[in-house]
Image (cartoon, grey):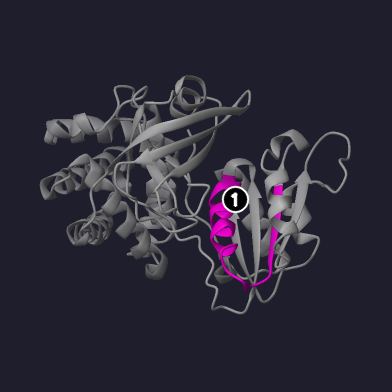
Amino acid sequence: MVGLIRDTWAKSEPFIPEISQFFYGMLFTLAPATRDFFPINMEVQRGRLVRALVHIVQMVDRPDDLVPFLTQLGRDHRKFGVIPRHYEAVGTALLASLKNHLGPDWTPEVERAWAEAFTIVARAMQEAAAADVNPASWSATVLEHRRLTWDLALVRVQPEFAVPYQPGQYMSVEVPQRPRLWRYLSPANAPREDGGIEFHVRAVDGGWVSRAIVSHTQPGDVWRLGPPLGRLAVDRADDRGVLMIAGGTGVAPLRAILDDLAQWGENPKVQLFYGGPSREDLYDLDELRALAATNPWLTVTPVIEHGDEAPGCVQGTLAEAVTQQGSWPGHRILVAGSPAMIRATVSRMLVAGSALDQIAYDPFTID
């Protein structure tokens, strides 16, 4: 089954835009109510479908990774009001889309493989959704919106009820300026007694939501937060050292972990490489250096790609800076940043000799 799925997916990739358009057209015909789950402009959503499918196909032979991902996906979809017949419509639309574009390559064997795979995916998601006793989403009021740079904002929100997230996790966010268009954000702080959450948001090119947050969010706005997702974490009982690699606002989930660790007297040794194109992009460096100054278990290494050398900064990409020190045996490795940064860094580390099971990262998307 795995071979057939990967082979046909590879043949489908040149037709991804057409397959996505056909899929949503078929889905909205089979289940018209699902149209209300999505934004008016479907451009971003089509890309998200493709990224999710790619991620699932990549993990189809790694159930230990796939099942947790599907579990979180199922919990996250509760916020849309998804019910079993919607899954049936999605499966029918997906298979019809692939069949329409694969032509003679869509054999009965291929159809059975995809049908079996989708059944496994849908079952895992539905079981996770049914087992979740938490709210499907939380309302949160914006308390503070502060521009850190022209394209970067710090936003503090106060949920009506505490969101049960763990340091390092992320959650989907819907803002009033972009209804039905969800974006993943990582809390930059460990859970607090008052339930407050801090987000760091950079406006990215073509980012409908991120640009709206940076430019138009105001105190008093009410956001919707989806359930916490992701598996970035540090187990304090594990004696291994921890290597953290953060690009840009990818520092937020790692900062939340550090915020949590700082509450304890003893921790594993943590080395954080924090990088960006220039010194100005390392907006949180002063705070991180202050944290390291009072916590001897933490070392912070800033990395800049361009511009004049800055005092205390390593020149180059994060991938280069980290692998110059070897393959980091005996370390847990956490990577957070843009999809491109994660791909480049993880690939370089694998070539350098790091083991895949050392490395943790989430399938984060930015828009």
Give me the residue at 13% from left, 32% from top: 33
Residue 126, x across and y down, in percent: 19, 57
* Quarter of the N terminus within the rendering: bottom left
Q: Is residue 126 above or below residue 26?
A: below
Would residue 87 appear left or right of 52 to someone viewing this image? left
Q: Is residue 11 left or right of residue 124?
A: right
Q: Nearer the viewer, residue 355 or 117?
A: 355
| Residue 320, placed above or below residue 218 | below
> Who's the residue at 64% across and 50% down the image?
246
Is 292 inside the magenta-drawn segment? no
Q: Which residue is mark 1?
A: 342
Count of number-bearing discs: 1
Q: Which residue is more in the foreground, 252 or 159?
A: 159
Is residue 94 something that shows in the picture? yes
Q: Is residue 259 magenta?
A: yes
Q: Is residue 123 above or below residue 98?
A: below
**Numbered range of the magenta stretch:** 250-274
On the image, the x and y values in percent for residue 347 come to 64, 57
